[in-house]
């Protein structure tokens, strides 16, 4: 397999075998907001050869402070379509499926049954579809990393990866844990979360949040950090990168 020149820095760090492994993997990312958009981009930049990205939402100007697809020039456009243009420009050879769909219930089942995915990334921000997606992946033995809430957080040093059963100080994680328990799942779900406490005054209840019930203040870098951490889990797991062995420095001519 020929590794393209644009991946030469990844090749230098990881070696041919790991890069070629990534080029032959198939990853699903659901939810392309502040976390999912950057996560999908980092996975594509790592050279994953086949991806499916899904989001039903369109860009709103309020997304511009934190979401990769969000620019004044893209306002009103589907996030999935905007991000697809970026990913194809990063890796023209990527096999990309773009779904402008609200992933829930039978759509989830159909998507997972037909996809033959090596990894799934859950960046859904509504409780029922999120919990159903997690369970559906577990039922099919599809490896999954799920993002908990990045809103209301400001300290990047509190972001970590753990099992869902060990999360705390996160409202979304609390409700996901409770919902998953009702579905018979108490642990075994790898998540990105922050234990930083949220100021409840930074949350407002409003109909503008539909289908959610509230809006929460969010700073530019936190969703991106969540997304990059989630992407790192996918990339390291797929390529079995437990530890990079640093050898002699190679001279670049």
Image (tube, rainbow, N blue to C red):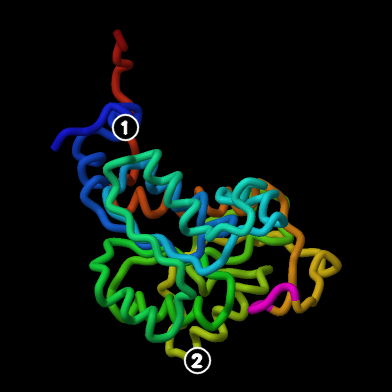
Camera-side mark, 1 or 2: 1
- Seen from the viewer's position, the closer of residues 196 and 124 is 124
In terms of sequence position, does the residue under pointer 1 or pointer 2 come before the other?
Answer: 1
Q: Identify the residue at the far right of this view.
A: 201
At x 62%, y 73%, the residue is 172
Question: Residue 179, position in %: x, y?
Answer: 54, 86
**Where is the N terminus found, in terms of image quarters?**
top left
Asked if residue 123 is positioned above or below residue 211 in the image, the reply reads above
Looking at this view, name the residue that lies furthest to the left.
1
Residue 70 position, x and y percent, is 61, 50
Principal secondary structure, stretch drawn in magenta: loop
Rounded to the nearest angstrom, the CA distance separating label 1 from label 2 is 44 Å
Q: Which residue is drawn at 62% across and 46% down?
A: 73
Residue furthest out toward the bottom: 182
- Residue 186 appears anywhere in the view: yes
Q: Position of residue 113 (x, y in %)?
A: 26, 77
118 or 110, which lies in front?
A: 110
Residue 137 included in the magenta stretch of the image: no
Residue occupying image coordinates x 26% and y 47% = 22
Q: Is mark 1 on a helix, strand or loop?
A: helix
- Find the magenta span and give its range: 208-212
Q: Is residue 210 magenta?
A: yes
Q: Can residue 240 be seen in this view?
A: no
| Category of crowding for the residue at label 1, using alpha-carbon neighbours closer than 10 angstroms: few (below 14), some (14–19), many (at least 20) | some
Q: Which of 49 and 86 is in front in this view?
A: 86
Residue under pointer 1: 7
Q: According to the image, label 2 marks what residue?
A: 182
Q: In which quarter of the image is the C terminus?
A: top left
62 or 253: nearer the viewer: 62
């Amino acid at each position: 397999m020929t590794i393209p020149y644009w991946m030469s820095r990844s090749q230098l760090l990881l070696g041919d075998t790991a890069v070629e492994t990534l080029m032959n993997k198939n990853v699903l990312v659901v939810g392309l907001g502040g976390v999912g958009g950057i996560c999908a981009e980092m996975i594509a930049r790592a050279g994953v050869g086949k991806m499916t990205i899904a989001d039903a939402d369109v860009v709103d100007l309020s997304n511009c402070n934190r979401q990769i697809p969000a620019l004044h020039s893209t306002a009103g456009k589907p996030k999935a379509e905007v991000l697809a243009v970026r990913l194809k420009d990063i890796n023209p050879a990527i096999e990309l499926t773009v779904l402008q769909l609200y992933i829930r219930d039978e759509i989830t089942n159909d998507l997972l049954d037909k996809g033959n995915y090596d990894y799934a990334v859950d960046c859904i921000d509504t409780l029922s579809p999120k919990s159903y997606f997690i369970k559906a992946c577990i039922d099919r033995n599809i490896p999954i990393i799920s993002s908990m809430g990045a809103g209301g957080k400001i300290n990047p040093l509190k972001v970590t990866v753990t099992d869902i059963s060990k999360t705390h100080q996160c409202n979304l994680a609390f409700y996901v844990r409770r919902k998953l328990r009702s579905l018979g799942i108490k642990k075994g779900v790898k998540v990105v979360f922050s234990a930083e406490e949220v100021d409840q005054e930074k949350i407002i209840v409003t109909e503008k949040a539909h289908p959610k019930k509230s809006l929460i203040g969010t700073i530019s870098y936190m969703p991106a950090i969540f997304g990059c951490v989630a992407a790192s889990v996918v990339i390291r797991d797929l390529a079995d990168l437990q530890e990079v062995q640093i050898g002699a420095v190679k001279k670049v001519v």
